[in-house]
Image: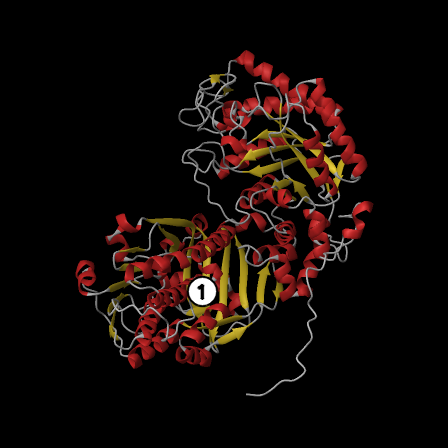
């Protein structure tokens, strides 16, 4: 964070002499104060259309990190804030009459009105002009008359809309209604309370912001809000009803308003934050849901960064580019966390039946910023109580608890995800596969999965893909499963069966992923004659007879897989390959019995599943990998994914491996840490089927957090296992775990402790001298 702003900073920007700030919220005021303090000769003016004491909301929460930046940049503001802060450590979660308390969280809050007063006083003392009850001049005039225009005019920013073509705003409205209220007493913790009413679930978010006042936000899904009649009530009646619903939390006291009204949260994202000498700041540039308390925090940090960049860079364009480059990744990370938190509360009804402590843990870790390990540091007693309720033996992290699928018990929850190696010859796995899969089996994972193993020569993705369509291939796989079972006893090995469909006949990944072969191509088949990429081969539309042939190819490959000694079989219905191509409306344009509605699009994949299940040994589990969204308009939706998972579960799938995307080339994934997990979470709770979560799960802390929160049953990791074949054993060593969930192979036992990397006991100085 560019909070280290000093008057002596090099490269003073002489051009930013006249500065206009539009919007007198905390971000705009703090930016004005900083810019004036850094250069008293600057002419800084703030326009605020409201009165000085007119503001939305009641309390403001700031993090220690933000306060540290304020302290360094402006000790006067920091000292004034310190005098008014209310501090507390606990979070209370009240659900079905039971309160669970987690400590060690460290919050600081004060009244929003008091924050504005402090910033007004600071601006006046520095010589910043503030025009209250005054609309700013037209943007073009401001931009012409000033060196810099700071648009801090909020979520409904008029400046952003005036230059929408340049800024590229995307505004998303969400599914809950909320109202911002206050109570005239101080809650003794940050409180989340759940109310299950005849109309649906409602929630309260509350926290103290003064010795005698608390912010109270009431939130619920739009359909619950309407069913409860709030859409027909005036503000006084709404507020009175909210007070009755949450009477226990409020100790029977009333709620009060500040021109409060029901609204929906809007997530604002901009393609660009500046144009010319106009720059967006705070909610005008970005918003993040109030459930992680980040709006004012982000705006204040924006102000710190903008002021620092104007000091450090030689001109305004360079400063604005540096400001956006610095802040954008920080804001994107916060927005991902806020989106996860927002969606958790939107889908709160899914979790109501969780065990009480797991529900509380799930809520606390909903944004993925608080994790199992982090929470254990903050409140070990609470975390241990969640682990006991979950069934973790003493000293056993959640990831090392066993999990049973049909007749197979996995000793831990870690899966080596299927990863295509493109290293087979004529479909036959060789020494590379033996070493690759064998090393990861020795590395401690509970389940090691093969790459997608093709059911026919025509069903390969590349010439290097492995298969199970000949006896020679099956014998080669038997060599590998025998090694896993004897060399790494207790590790299970699974096979993933699939057919490339329209994504076949391409180069090896490192020669050009999804690029057609320059020669030696084979004909492709698919649900519909649509090429995967422009210029790619157009597949043939599959006839009824061809569908029967392919179904039998899957069954034959499954029979060989059973004889080859695999413990688990996964049917690949994801990533745009053949069976996935039937499921997505973007790739299935058929008008016969295998296209159209979701029920019809499911028909062929289910026929294949049934044929495979019929020959696969009854005691061995069978899973299905799906793409839960296509990340493209008109494609598979999260609701479709639930329907797909429910259909496979009804046909006997023991678990659903929930991935996303790679179905169409024009996809736009929303990447981020464990970004696919919410899809698995929803399927787990709606379908009541075990799930495997995949996608940017990289740390053992993530695995523990997701398992303990009940968002998944197993975690599949790909790239971490390429980086470290012994990832699971190292995770055990780093957590001090030595139990049955992660036994070290005898030949490796001497390496079960992290090697020392250098001397850490340098001699201490013999003498200390004072100043």
Q: Quadrant of the C terminus?
A: bottom right
Q: What is the residue that sits farthest to the top in this orientation?
A: 545
Q: Is residue 252 left or right of residue 685?
A: left
Q: Quadrant of the N terminus?
A: bottom left
- Kindly identify which residue carries mark 1: 1
Q: How many marks are shown on the rendered structure? A: 1
Please tell me which residue lies in front, 381 or 28: 28
Q: Position of residue 362 (x, y in %)?
A: 59, 54
In this view, 382 is above or below 729: below
In this view, 236 is above or below 560: below
**Residue 405 visible, this orientation:** no
Q: Position of residue 670 (x, y in %)?
A: 46, 44
**Residue 457 visible, this orientation:** yes
Q: Could you tell me which residue is drawn at 49 percent across and 76 percent down?
A: 86
Q: Could you tell me which residue is drawn at 62 percent across and 62 percent down?
A: 375
Q: Secondary structure at mark 1?
A: loop
Please tell me which residue lies in front, 112 or 294: 294
> To which quarter of the image does residue 147 belong?
bottom left
Please tell me which residue lies in front, 432 or 371: 432
> To which quarter of the image does residue 417 belong?
top right
Q: Could you tell me which residue is drawn at 30 percent across and 79 percent down?
A: 126
In this view, 329 is above or below 188: above
Q: What is the residue that sits farthest to the bottom in this orientation?
A: 770
Q: Position of residue 294 (x, y in %)?
A: 45, 62
Q: Is residue 86 left or right of residue 611?
A: left
């Amino acid at each position: 964070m560019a909070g280290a702003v000093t008057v002596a900073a090099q490269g003073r920007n002489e051009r930013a002499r006249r500065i206009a700030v539009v919007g007198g919220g905390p971000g705009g005021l703090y930016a004005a104060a900083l810019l004036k303090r850094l250069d008293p000769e600057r002419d800084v003016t703030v326009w605020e259309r409201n009165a000085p004491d007119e503001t939305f909301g009641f309390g403001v929460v700031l993090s220690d990190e933000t306060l540290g930046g304020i302290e360094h940049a402006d000790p006067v503001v920091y000292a004034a804030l310190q005098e008014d802060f209310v501090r507390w450590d606990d979070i209370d979660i009240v659900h079905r009459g039971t309160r669970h308390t987690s400590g060690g969280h460290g919050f600081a809050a004060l009244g929003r009105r008091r924050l504005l007063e402090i910033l007004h006083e600071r601006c006046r003392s520095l010589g910043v002009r503030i025009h209250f009850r005054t609309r700013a001049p037209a943007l073009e005039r401001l931009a012409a008359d000033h060196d810099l225009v700071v648009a801090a005019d909020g979520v409904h920013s008029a400046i952003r809309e005036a230059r929408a073509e340049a800024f590229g705003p995307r505004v998303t409205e969400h599914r809950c209604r909320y109202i911002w209220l206050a109570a005239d007493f101080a809650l003794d913790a940050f409180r989340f309370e759940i109310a299950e009413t005849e109309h649906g679930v409602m929630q309260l978010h509350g926290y103290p912001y003064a010795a005698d006042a608390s912010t109270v936000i009431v939130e619920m899904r739009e359909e619950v809000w309407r069913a409860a009649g709030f859409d027909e009530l005036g503000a006084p009646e709404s507020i009175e009803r909210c007070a009755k619903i949450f009477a226990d939390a409020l100790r029977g006291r009333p709620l009060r308003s500040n021109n409060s009204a029901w609204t929906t949260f809007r997530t604002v994202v901009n393609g660009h934050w500046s144009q010319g000498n106009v720059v967006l700041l705070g909610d005008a540039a970005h918003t993040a849901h109030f459930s992680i308390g980040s709006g004012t925090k982000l705006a204040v940090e924006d102000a710190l960064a903008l002021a620092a960049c104007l000091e450090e860079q030689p001109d305004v364009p360079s400063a604005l580019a540096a400001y956006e480059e610095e802040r954008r990744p920080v804001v994107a990370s916060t927005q991902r966390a806020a989106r996860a938190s927002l969606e958790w509360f939107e889908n709160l009804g899914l979790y109501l039946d969780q065990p009480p402590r797991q529900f509380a843990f799930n809520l606390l870790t909903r944004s993925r910023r608080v994790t199992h390990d982090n929470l254990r540091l903050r409140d070990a007693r609470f975390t241990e109580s969640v682990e006991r309720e979950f069934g973790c033996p003493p000293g056993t992290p959640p990831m090392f608890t066993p999990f049973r699928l049909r007749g197979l018990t996995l000793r831990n929850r870690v899966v080596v995800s299927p990863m295509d190696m493109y290293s087979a010859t004529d479909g036959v796995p060789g020494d590379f596969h033996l070493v690759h899969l064998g090393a990861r089996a020795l590395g401690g994972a509970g389940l090691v999965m093969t790459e997608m193993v093709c059911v026919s020569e025509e069903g390969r993705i590349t010439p290097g893909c492995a298969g199970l369509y000949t006896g020679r291939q099956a014998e080669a796989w038997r060599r590998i499963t025998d090694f896993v079972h004897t060399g790494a006893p207790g590790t299970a090995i699974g096979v993933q069966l699939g057919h490339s469909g329209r994504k076949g006949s391409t180069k090896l990944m490192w020669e050009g992923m999804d690029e057609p072969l320059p020669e030696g191509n084979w004909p492709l088949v698919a649900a519909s004659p649509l090429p995967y990429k422009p210029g790619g081969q157009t597949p043939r539309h599959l006839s009824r007879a061809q569908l029967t042939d392919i179904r039998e190819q899957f069954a034959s490959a499954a029979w060989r897989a059973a004889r080859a000694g695999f413990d688990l079989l996964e049917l690949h219905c994801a990533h745009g390959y053949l069976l996935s191509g039937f499921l997505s409306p973007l790739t299935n344009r058929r008008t016969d019995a295998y296209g159209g509605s979701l029920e019809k699009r499911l028909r062929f994949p289910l026929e294949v599943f049934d044929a495979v299940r019929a020959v696969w040994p009854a005691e061995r589990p069978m899973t299905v990998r799906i793409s839960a969204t296509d990340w493209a308009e008109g494609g598979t939706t999260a609701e479709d994914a639930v329907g797909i998972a429910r259909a496979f579960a009804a046909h006997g799938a023991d678990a659903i491996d929930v991935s996303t995307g790679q179905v169409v080339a024009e996809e736009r994934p929303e990447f981020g840490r464990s970004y696919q997990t919410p899809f698995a979470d929803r399927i787990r709770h709606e379908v009541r089927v075990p799930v495997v979560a995949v996608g940017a799960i990289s740390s053992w802390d993530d695995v523990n957090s997701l398992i303990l929160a009940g968002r998944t049953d197993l975690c599949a990791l790909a790239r971490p296992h390429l980086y470290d074949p012994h990832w699971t054993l190292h995770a055990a060593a780093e957590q001090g775990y030595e139990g049955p969930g992660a036994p070290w192979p005898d030949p490796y036992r001497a390496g079960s402790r992290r090697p020392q990397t250098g001397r850490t006991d340098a001699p201490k100085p013999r003498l200390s001298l004072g100043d």
